[in-house]
Structures are given as structure tokens and as C-alpha cells.
Amino acid sequence: MALLCIATHDMMAVDGRCVITGTVVERRTLEPFAGIDVLLDGKRVGVTNAHGAFVLDGLDAGDHLVSAIIPEWGTYSTQVHCLSGATNKVRILAWPNAMVNIRGILAHYALDGNGVDDGPNGWHGTLEGAEPTEDRAGLSHRALRFTGATLGVAVPHQARLNKLPLTLSCWIKMDASCPPNCAFIGKYLVPNGDGWCVFLSDDRFGGGYFTEFFRNSTRSHGAASRDGSWHHIVYSMDSTAGVLYVDDARLPQVVAFKHTVVETENTEPFCIGRTTTLLGEEGFSGAIDDIYLFDHVLSDEERLLLTHAP
């Protein structure tokens, strides 16, 4: 099965039973898929309408697997945790030749001109100076452009984003004028050396998880590119190490944890464009698109799916 999909919960009483409403759309264009078979827990239960929508009602509370079968593309699925008396909204995003099913999405910021999180938790961010721009497919208002002069996007503190394991996936395109030193995505407290971020350091891409006033940390970095192209970044962190990939190339770890990490407890927001505690410094200059946060270290198969997604 294959997919990246988004599920959210909208608490509405439905006689104590559960309802799943959803749509099946193409990932980049959001064009709906009409007449597509929909499966619930492996059994065919209906088809999407002309708008790519479907409704599954009278369900028991608990976990359900919802799938859509797209001819010549594959089967796209998501697991939905249905709450008693709730209407659960699902959007299944599909594209051709997807290879694996990526679960454990904590948040997804499409950055379609805003800071909306269309992942399962609804951790929405506030837009502070970033402007809509074209994404890597050339579609307008489908990414955000950052100048470095303002914050960008700030998501209020979420304790889960302090916890390990955790993976960040994003696409970035640097301006030629982007400063060589800036932390541009993360949840990081300065000067305490507390939290995590992806950054530029002496014009090198970097990723780090820092605790105990820098006394116990992990850090990786490698050469950055100002070629005017989009580049994919994946940074996975667990209690043993942080692993940074740029365009499928694993960058070397230059600092390793000295002992079992004590997770950060900072209450900083999750920031896109520049961390709030670096307001005296310049932030990222360029475009950022399609940020995912996952609750696990991605497998190679999952990472490659994201890297080669259209």
C-alpha cells in the first residue's frame, strides 16, 4: 500500500457511532479522483463521487484502515482513530508509483500561503512576514518565501516536538543572498543550547539536537548549494543520534551524544524561517515548502518516497 494522507478529527455527535468523511485527491494539483473504490478495513464499501468525496457511517469507535484504489497508481491508505460520536475527516493524497505507506505523521505544513497544519493534530502556525510563492512544481501560492527580516511562521509550543524519536522533512530553495549562518527550522532555545533545529553554519547545511547547555548534543553538517534549485532535507533524531540527509545524501555526523540524551523541555515555538530567539540575527532567505513531522525515524524506503515525490 502507498500513501501520504492527512486525517483530522471534528468532534460532532452522531448517535454514539462514528462517521468518516473524506476525499481522494492528487497530491500537487488537488484534483479529485471520481469513481474510485473505497475500502474500510480491507473490504470494499463504496466509491468516491464526482468531487472525489466519500462518507462511511455507522462505524464502531476505534482504529479503522481507510483505503482508496487508483487504477495503475496503487492503493493509498490511512489509519483513522475514530472517537465515539465523532465525525472524522480524512484527505487522501495520491500520486503515481508511490512505494510505501508512511505512518506516524505528527504535522504537515503545505505552506500554501499560510501556516495551516493539515495533519492529525492541527498545530497551526501564525504567518509573520513570509509571502506566498511558487512551489517546486511551479504552482503559484503553494510555498512560502522568506526574506530573513521577519520571523516567518511560528507554531505555539507543542510538548511532543521535544520528544524523541522525531523526523523533519522539508524542501528548501536558497537565495544567493541567504546568510551563511542561520537557524531556519526548529524548536530551539538560545543561548541555552536546548532543543533542535536545521540550520546553515559557515554556509553548510546542518542539523542538531542540543541539551544540557550543549554538553550533550548531536550535530551533522555538509556543503550547502545556492544553485537556485529545490533541495530536500530529512533530519531524523532519536536517543542515540541525529541523521541528516540532503537530496538523498547522508551528511557526516561531526558531534555525537556523549551519553543517553535527556530530552529537551523548552517551551519555545516550532519556527519556520527563523527561530524566535535569534531575532538579533538574520533568518533564512529563500523558499520553503511541504514540511512534514513524523513520530519515528524514517526507513530508507520512506525517506526515498519523500525525496522522489512529485
Image (tube, grey):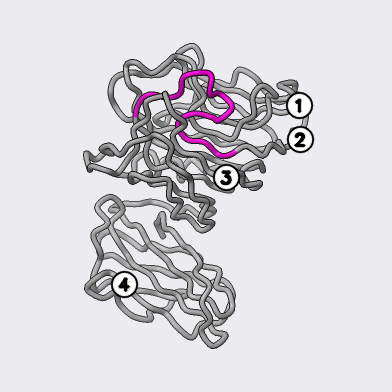
Mark 3 vs mark 1: in front:
3
State the CA–CA distance, disc 2 to disc 1: 8 Å
Secondary element at tag 1: loop
Graded by Cα atoms within 10 Å as few (under 14), some (14 to 19) or many (20 or more), the crowding at tag 1 reads: some
Residue 167 location in percent, x, y? 54, 40
Q: Is residue 261 left or right of residue 115?
A: right
Rate crowding at label 3 as few (under 14), some (14 to 19) or many (20 or more) other CA atoms within 10 Å.
Answer: some
The N terminus - image quarter: bottom left
Residue 15 pos. (x, y %)? 54, 88
Q: Disc 4 vs disc 3: Cβ atoms closer than 8 Å?
A: no
What residue did someone put label 3 on? 156
The answer to which image quadrant residue 228 occupies is top left
Question: From mark 4 to mark 3, how far is it between C-alphas?
Answer: 32 Å
Q: Amino acid at mark 2?
A: Val
Q: Bounds of the magenta span?
A: 269-286
Instruction: Give the amino acid at mark 3.
Output: Pro
* Extreme-bottom residue of the structure: 15
Q: Is residue 289 magenta?
A: no
Name the amino acid, label 4: Ala
Please tell me which of labels 4 and 3 falls first in the chain.
Answer: 4
Residue named by callout 1: 212
Three-letter amino acid code at the position of disc 1: Glu
Which residue is found at the position 69% from the left and 33% from the top? 240
Q: CA distance from mark 3 to mark 2?
A: 22 Å
Nearest the viewer among 12 and 49 is 12
Give the foreground label among 3 and 2: 3
Reading the image, the residue beneath label 2 is 262
Looking at the rendered image, the disc whose residue lies closer to the viewer, 2 or 1, is 1
Q: Is residue 280 magenta?
A: yes
